Amino acid sequence: MSLTAQIRGKAGELGFNLFGVTPADPLAGAEFYARWVALGFAGEMDYLKRNLGKRADPRQLVPDARAVICLGMDYTPPPTAPPSGDDPARIASYALGDDYHELIKSRLRQLWGWICNQTGGERSGRYYVDTAPVLERELAQRAGLGWWGKNTCLINRDRGSYFFLAEIILDLELEFDQPATDHCGTCTRCLEACPTDAFPKPYVLDASRCISYLTIELKGPIPNPLRPLMQDWVFGCDICQQVCPWNGGAPTTSEPALQPRDSLRDPHLLELMALDPAAFRDRFRNNPVKRPKRAGFLRNVAVALGNRKKVDATPVLTTALDDDEPLIRAHAAWALGQIGGEAGRTALNKALTTEQEEVVRAEIESALLELEANASEDRTGIAS
Ligand code: SF4
């Protein structure tokens, strides 16, 4: 059996569902990527704007690299029961279990150790999961793992797109795989389904409009015009993958660490909005949702409650107007403005008497204006 086949077998034993090898040559997509960054499509993700040279060439990371092993691990969760209650919160499926970084890094470490042992000890190489300044989707496409879909996810004919990517750049001469070819055809489902219109054209994502970016990467306030479009997503978004026909038969993950946690199977907006710092830490320990921290996460929950427009959220949002985090207070104010009602108006007017932060005051004032406008619309409706 060739060394490449042995490594493939070992990767499978370690839980990797996809495996391919490509030469460690410079990447053709580097120019496209630089243009994408220049157009502002990376939003505030400054780490994506650095190291453009390294991203274009794996040998900038491992100078004597000859091959890149590309790996994929499924994360499709098993089907769950429909949400209970009328305040469901939606979380991207990759975030329902443990944080994948540690899991995959430990498998990569084992695979790398095994490769070194099999090939006589010390080797030159590095392995990454989401952490390298390298264009991993292009490498994976070249290694045959899947094609770059119109939704910009990597799509595999047998496994869909719900998988994590990882790679090992190394100095070994291995057998290379054929690049994957595009099978999107005339389909445009993902482009039409995106609620925030985050695809300026097929194969291009304006991340600054993407719900995943807005709920995870963006640190500050969510731009006002995008809030009503975000539905009930509070961490990430799966819409462009859910509608993709290639995900219809995607196998579910058998990895225990990636199974949905009981506490995340059926999350509810009202209880999430009430999480204090200790409860947030407990609930999301070793889980991706901790990334935007409590302030960013409750900002997202407040937006979802504002979109839900039900007055049973007024008490919990009123409490949030006193939160220590200005980001939470600001978005709670916005949500109260969307929901309307006398109790919300009273809470906003009261908050205005004590609020010191300019940004939050501006949100409260604009929420009160929104309430006023809606009330006068209602009056007009009644009068006519
Ligand atoms: Fe391609 Fe259709 Fe899937 Fe979009 S939904 S990625 S167009 S196959």
Image: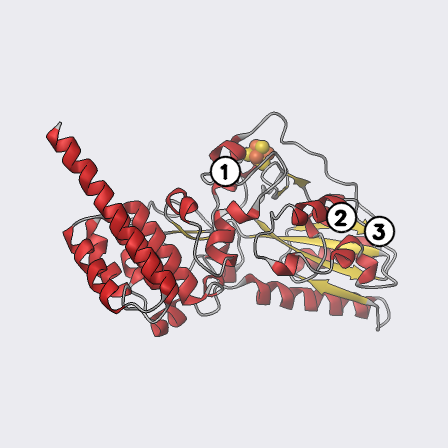
Q: Secondary structure at mark 3?
A: loop
Query: Alpha carbon of mark 1 to alpha carbon of mark 3: how far?
Result: 34 Å
Q: Secondary structure at mark 1?
A: loop
Query: Alpha carbon of mark 3 to alpha carbon of mark 2: how far?
Result: 12 Å
- Residue that numbered label 2 is attached to: 30
Q: Are marks 2 and 1 in contact (CB under 8 Å)?
A: no
Q: Quadrant of the C terminus?
A: top left
Q: From what the image shows, is residue 114 above or below residue 208?
A: below
| Mark 2 crowd level (few <14, some 14–19, many ≥20, 10 Å Cα) | some
Residue at point 84% right, 69% down? 123
Q: Where is residue 339 drawn, in percent x and y?
A: 24, 48
Tell me the mark number nearer the camera, choosing from 3 and 2: 2
In the displayed structure, does residue 363 sit left or right of residue 238? left
Query: Alpha carbon of mark 2 to alpha carbon of mark 1: how far?
Result: 25 Å
Q: Quadrant of ligand 1?
A: top right
Q: Where is residue 66 drawn, in percent x and y?
A: 86, 57
Identify residue type, mark 1: Asp
Q: From what the image shows, is residue 299 above or below residue 40?
A: below
**Nearer to me, 169 or 248:** 169
**Nearer the N terminus, badge 3 or badge 2?**
3
Q: Where is residue 105 drawn, in percent x and y?
A: 64, 66
Residue at point 43% right, 53% down? 222
- Residue that numbered label 1 is attached to: 197
Q: Are marks 1 and 3 in contact (CB under 8 Å)?
A: no
Q: Where is residue 79 drawn, in percent x and y?
A: 42, 46
In the displayed structure, does residue 215 sit left or right of residue 178? left
- Residue that numbered label 3 is attached to: 25
| Mark 1 crowd level (few <14, some 14–19, many ≥20, 10 Å Cα) | some
